[in-house]
């Protein structure tokens, strides 16, 4: 691949990134999404996907807060690396939401396994196609001919809006759809949102190019707005609540499996 084309590709996406502040602002929505599998798990006594999702949200929260507190600036390389991590997490979270619906809504074990395998393969193929599209364009020197410009970083907002719209449509459709059809519709919507969020995963490739070819770019300061005492207390209460529910879910799994009696 031509170095000028690679550089053009990197520079083209210089303004397409998720800042640490933006990643941290998504902790609240992710915690809310984490409550969905908890509720489903408690009601249905099926905790496998719920445990994975809640554990992932907790790890994301801890990871982002550590970065936010310790880093004073984000390098050009880190800008794309963190954006790739965020996009991957966002995409996988909605993919797990689809798995949750399969686990809870489809009673036949064989159908669950088949559906889950198909869904996983479809997601992997979609991600590979996204990477392939980017690589082909680099080899065709498409980005070399383009001026550096802003690529919209609003995937998270758009995906969140799509999630809310999808859930709303599912509720409306459930009035005239059977339960099985409604579950399939929501599974497909969750998959579409997961694929849409995966459009940001190639940021990993950009960070690789920046590191390998020593492409220079501006480091960005980590902006830390002052937080009121009331807001800090509220955040701690929410985190404590999620941790409590997580322990309940894990305890439920252990009891359900006969490990605890």
Image (cartoon, rainbow, N blue to C red):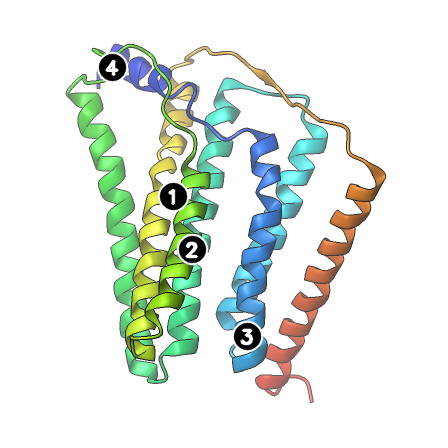
Task: Look at the picture and state if 6 lies above or below 68.
Answer: above
> Is 61 left, or right, of 141 in this rendering?
right
Question: Helix or strand or loop: what does disc 2 sit on?
Answer: helix
Sequence order check, earlier mark of 4 and 3: 4
- Name the residue beneath numbered marker 2: 94
What residue sits 28% from the left and 10% below the top? 147
What separation in Å lies between label 2 and label 3 (alpha carbons)?
16 Å
What residue sits 33% from the left and 38% below the top? 199
**Label pair 2/3, CB-CB below 8 angstroms:** no
Sequence order check, earlier mark of 3 and 1: 3
Residue furthest left in the image: 140
> Is 207 left, or right, of 220 in this rendering?
left
Q: Position of residue 142 (x, y in %)?
A: 19, 18
Q: Position of residue 209 (x, y in %)?
A: 37, 22
What separation in Å lies between label 2 and label 4 (alpha carbons)?
33 Å
Question: Helix or strand or loop: what does disc 4 sit on?
Answer: helix
Q: Nearer the viewer, mark 4 or mark 3?
A: 3
- Name the residue beneath numbered marker 3: 41
- Name the residue beneath numbered marker 4: 5
Q: Where is residue 173 in the image (x, y as percent from the top left)?
A: 32, 68
């Amino acid at each position: 691949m031509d170095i000028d084309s690679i550089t053009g590709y990197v520079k083209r996406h210089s303004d397409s990134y998720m800042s640490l502040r933006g990643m941290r602002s998504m902790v609240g929505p992710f915690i809310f999404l984490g409550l969905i599998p908890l509720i489903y798990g408690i009601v249905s006594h099926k905790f496998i996907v719920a445990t994975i999702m809640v554990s992932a949200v907790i790890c994301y929260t801890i990871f982002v807060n550590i970065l936010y507190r310790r880093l004073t600036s984000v390098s050009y390389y880190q800008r794309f690396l963190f954006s790739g991590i965020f996009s991957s997490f966002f995409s996988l979270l909605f993919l797990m939401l689809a798995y949750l619906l399969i686990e809870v809504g489809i009673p036949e074990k064989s159908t669950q396994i088949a559906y889950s395998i198909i869904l996983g393969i479809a997601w992997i193929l979609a991600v590979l196609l996204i990477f392939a599209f980017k690589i082909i364009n680099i080899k065709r020197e498409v980005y070399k001919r383009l001026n550096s410009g802003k690529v919209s970083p609003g995937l998270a907002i758009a995906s969140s809006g799509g999630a809310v719209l999808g859930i709303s449509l599912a509720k409306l459709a459930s009035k005239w759809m059977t339960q099985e059809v409604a579950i399939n519709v929501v599974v497909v919507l969750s998959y579409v949102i997961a694929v849409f969020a995966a459009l940001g995963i190639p940021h990993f490739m950009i960070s690789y190019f920046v590191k390998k070819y020593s492409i220079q770019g501006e480091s960005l300061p980590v902006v830390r707005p002052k937080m009121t005492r009331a807001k800090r207390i509220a955040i701690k209460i929410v985190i404590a609540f999620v941790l409590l529910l997580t322990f309940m879910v894990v305890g439920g799994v252990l009891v359900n499996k006969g490990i605890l009696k």
